[in-house]
Amino acid sequence: MKKKTYYITTPIYYPSDRLHIGHAYCTTIADAVARYRRMSGYDVFFLTGSDEHGQKIQRKAAEGNVTPKEYVDGIVASFQQLWLKLGISNDDFIRTTEERHHKVVQAIFQKIYDQGDIYKAAYEGKYCTPCETFWTERQLQDGNCPDCGRGVETVQEESYFFRMSKYQERLLQFIEENPEFIQPVSRRNEMINFIKQGLEDLCVSRTTFDWGIQVPFDSKHVVYVWFDALTNYITAAGYGQDDGKFEKYWPADVHLVGKEIVRFHSIIWPVILMALDLPLPKKVYGHGWLVVEGDKMSKSKGNVIDPVGLIEEFGPDAIRYFLLREITLGNDGNFSREALINRINADLANDLGNLLHRSLNMIGRFSDGNLPPCGELGEFDKQLQDLAKTTVAQYETAMDAMDINQALKLVWTLIGRTNKYIDETAPWALAKEEAKREQLHTVLHHLAAILRVVAILISPFMPHTAPKIWQQLGLGDDFAASLDDAKRFDGLPVGKAVAKPEPIFPRIEEKKEEEAKTSPVAAAKTAVKEKAPEQAAEISIDDFAKVDLRVVKVLAADKVKGADRLLTLTVDLGEEQRTIVSGIAQHYAPEDLVGRHVVMVVNLKAAKIRGIESRGMVLAASCDGKLAVVESSLPPGSKVK
């Protein structure tokens, strides 16, 4: 049976400088969609690339005393290295300086000229070099470019023009008859209003610079950058060079672009295709901007975020997850270091990482490290299976609609429910009774089965993490699961040995800003001036051995009624749960404690505090009441020595 095809593109990025986190956001979205479609059985063609011509590039090269090609070669190489670091799975990378593209651009320019849709005329108007865009006086805003806000130049030259106006009504009719063509709806409405104001013929050649593709019948002119750049989508698909490939993949299923260039992709590009008598792409999706601390990225503001540094510090999958989970596609999204670290700690370390570690640890302890069989299902087991099946179905619906944020929420709801399932079924208690061994194995089987499903579902978003989970589950070193595999809940090789659990996302503890600014030397000087704390009487090692210190995970926290300083904590000790009362309410909100791993005195004599039996004590510093927080990779019950 012939596979269904899916063709997705990013914009081709302009190599005037290195890429920032906003470019990484766009390409990560496209990559997640491409990986999902492959996982769903599609023959996918995923394209990205670089748009290398234009006056701006020529000027920058001259400033650096190099040729334009030498200038762009180094920057384009940095694009390709970034995509490798980020795990981008593009099938092709097109450069507009390639010979294959030159041939296509000249061929379509000649074809459209021959049919009378391109003509020569004198041009006088306003031109924005950074945006490579011509504007009329009425389109300017306070005399500046309406897109970027920068100044424009008055240009007077002989140019060739493309009869955009000829296709205005035809394009408007197409957009109105195909409501899915421009997404989201807000962008579609903007484009309809723009077209109704009247399309003017487009200047498609320049003579004041020569860094571009030469007009085939007039050597004084080079093809204007947008007419050149937009054509890349059919060049890579094989237009005029590989008819079989072109017939297979065109029209594109989606052009994913930033909202600032939706107009070029949903007006100029469709009109070019209409003039060529070619099908239009099925969808143009304009995503929002990524802003930093609520402000648009700008070199002058010094807030441009380099994705390479983030990848090296936090890893590619943490960055991918944050971008895809934090931002709803189509809306603007905010990037901050604090939000990134919170996502890593809460979602990746506490939720996913802890589930994997606890599950494998219990399989190791209670099933000799082998995937156990599934016995008769209890109520909690049935609920978990039903949620897994529902999650996969809803995930598929969300991803088909490119609602990536919702798909990730669904997966993390399943992860959260599975963590709760551990608390409900208490495997450590089942392990104490031989008569409940089958029930214990069923619980452990379900934990491994859910992790298998989760690994499949997160693979489009976190392509480096999914194989790690797969390998730790003992499912092999090669991850090649499909969406259909996720629909089969019971796909575990019973008896297979699982690997030793290894942290996939260690918790990140950020120093306070004041601490980060303090040098070790300054800190040492400060310490000398401070009065040394009084020390308690010395004890022997035998005395210390009497104190049973364990790592526990806080499952729940609530304020004690009528007591400003007290919280009740429900903690997981690995083999049991306990309730303790702690005087830390002035330093922590209850919700801030859930999921933390702290140190507790386990063998402290029970005491009643405000009518609540407290069985243990968590360790906190006397100076500020802060808890002794430990690595989340340490499983509950770990002994502190």
Image: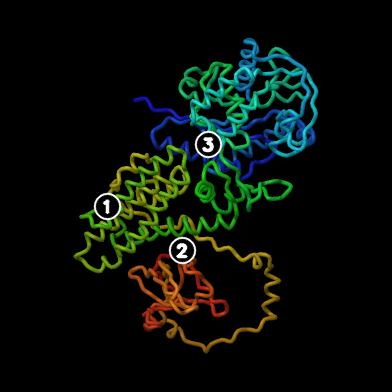
Farthest-out residue, bottom: 537
User: In the rendered view of the protein, which quadrant contains the N terminus?
Assistant: top left
| x 52%, y 35%: residue | 183
Query: Residue 386 at x, y = what percent?
Result: 29, 50
Which residue does the numbered mark 1 point to in the structure image? 495
| x 64%, y 19%: residue | 165
| x 19%, y 65%: residue | 435
- Using the rendered view, name the quadrant where residue 575 is placed: bottom left
Q: Secondary structure at mark 2?
A: loop
User: Please, what is the three-letter code of the amino acid marked with disc 2?
Assistant: Ser
Q: Is residue 223 something that shows in the picture?
A: no
Viewer-closest of 264 and 178 = 178
User: Please, what is the three-letter code of the amino acid marked with disc 1?
Assistant: Gly
Q: Secondary structure at mark 1?
A: loop
- The residues tagged by marks 2 and 1 sit, at their Cα atoms, a distance apart of 28 Å
Q: Earlier in the sequence, mark 1 or mark 3?
A: 3
Which residue does the numbered mark 2 point to in the structure image? 632
Asked if the residues shown at circle 2 and circle 3 are in contact, with their CB atoms under 8 angstroms apart, the answer is no
| x 53%, y 27%: residue | 175
Q: Which one is closest to the eye, mark 2 or mark 3?
A: 3
In this picture, residue 144 sits left or right of residue 475: right
Query: Residue 207 at x, y = what percent?
Result: 77, 21
